[in-house]
Image (cartoon, rainbow, N blue to C red):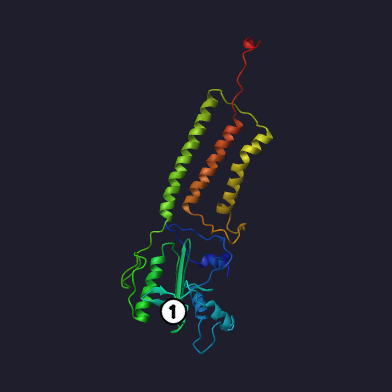
């Protein structure tokens, strides 16, 4: 179901890679990534892909068994219509379309969320795990490894290298890339702020020297110079800072929209850019006086 005020009040706060609360936001995608459900409901959905405890056919009367069979169909790359469908050996994916697929699994994430499910279609055993952190992938991998150890009795490899290995230890959160991207964005924004502020200082100095003065510019000049900055700023403010109840004109092909810390750097940069632009527009250079004695 979609998000409303009651669900938002009951749901936990999602946290980003800087451990900052990222809140809730309409997603660019219009499929499962824009839907919300509880972990028990998620588990019921996954369990419906296999025969029920009393012999109910897959699909549980909602989807036809042949539809479920198509969703579980394995491709050579180990992908399927519903999820990854594969044989797993010691935790490693070994896709083989010539053999009956034994397990279905999928990892999914959005900023502030991580989820993972796995189900053994032969044993009719599996798990669903979700957490409200962008750094939660190692935790989900830990659950998977614990499941392999307790249900299948096998130890799994550490792949990726920083994955959780010992089920008795506390999994370390992942590093993510937001911190590095945030640092790079801060440095770029700081350099551009400095350039804009130096330009504004240069303009103000010329104003104090009488080389620039207030003047209402022609309409065409105002539109040509102001339109790009003003239009970009308005779109940016609407997408990232408008109330979340307002619709976003985004198609499913666009990425999700999240108000991460680096967004605020860009917002401030656009505001400064517009302010400096206004300064130069409304305080143009004074025309140079012509010495009449030199005119023939």
Q: Is residue 103 above or below residue 289?
A: below
Q: Quadrant location of residue 224?
A: top right
Q: Position of residue 131 (x, y in %)?
A: 44, 67
Q: Which residue is mark 1?
A: 126
* Residue occupying the point 53% across, 71% down: 37
For the point 68% across and 35% down, which residue is it?
220
Seen from the viewer's position, the closer of residues 32 and 278 is 32
Q: Residue at x 52, y 80 (%)?
A: 49
Q: Residue at x 37, y 66 (%)?
A: 160
In the image, farthest residue toward the front: 98
Quarter occupied by the N terminus:
bottom right
Is residue 156 rendered to the left or right of residue 205? left
| 150 lies left or right of 55 | left
Q: Quick one: which residue is furthest to the bottom in this view?
A: 54
Q: Residue furthest right?
A: 219
Whether 264 is drawn above or below 5: the answer is: above
Q: Is residue 275 above or below residue 75?
A: above
- Residue nearest the viewer, comparing 106 with 260: 106
* Pointer 1 local density, CA inside 10 Å: few below 14, some 14–19, many at least 20: many
Q: Position of residue 158 (x, y in %)?
A: 34, 69
For mark 1, give the secondary structure. Answer: strand
Location of residue 288 in the rendering, given as x and y in whole percent from the top left corner: 60, 20
Residue 167, position as x, y percentages in the image = 33, 73
Residue 140 lies in what quarter of the image? bottom left
């Amino acid at each position: 179901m979609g998000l409303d005020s009651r669900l938002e009040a009951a749901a936990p706060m999602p946290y980003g890679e800087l451990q900052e609360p990222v809140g809730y936001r309409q997603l660019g995608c219009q499929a499962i990534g824009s839907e919300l459900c509880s972990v028990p409901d998620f588990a019921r959905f996954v369990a419906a892909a296999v025969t029920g405890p009393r012999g109910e056919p897959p699909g549980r009367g909602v989807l036809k068994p042949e539809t479920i069979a198509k969703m579980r169909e394995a491709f050579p790359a180990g992908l399927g219509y519903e999820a990854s469908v594969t044989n797993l050996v010691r935790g490693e994916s070994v896709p083989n379309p010539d053999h009956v697929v034994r397990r279905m699994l999928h990892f999914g994430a959005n900023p502030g969320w991580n989820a993972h499910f796995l189900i053994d279609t032969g044993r009719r055993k599996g798990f669903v795990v979700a957490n409200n952190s962008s750094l939660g992938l190692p935790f989900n991998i830990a659950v998977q490894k614990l499941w392999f150890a307790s249900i299948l009795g096998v130890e799994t490899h550490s792949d990726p290298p920083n994955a959780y290995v010992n089920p008795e230890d506390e999994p370390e959160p992942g590093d993510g890339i937001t911190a590095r991207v945030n640092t790079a964005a801060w440095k770029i924004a700081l350099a551009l702020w400095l350039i804009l502020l130096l330009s504004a200082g240069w303009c103000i100095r010329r104003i104090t020297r009488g080389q620039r003065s207030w003047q209402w510019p022609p309409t065409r000049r105002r539109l040509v110079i102001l339109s790009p900055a003003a239009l970009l700023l308005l779109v940016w403010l609407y997408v990232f800072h408008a109330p979340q109840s307002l619709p976003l004109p985004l198609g499913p092909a666009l990425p999700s929209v999240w108000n991460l810390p680096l967004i605020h750097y860009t917002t401030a940069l656009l505001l400064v850019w517009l302010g400096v632009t206004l300064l130069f527009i409304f305080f143009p250079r004074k025309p140079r006086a012509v010495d009449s004695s030199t005119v023939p």
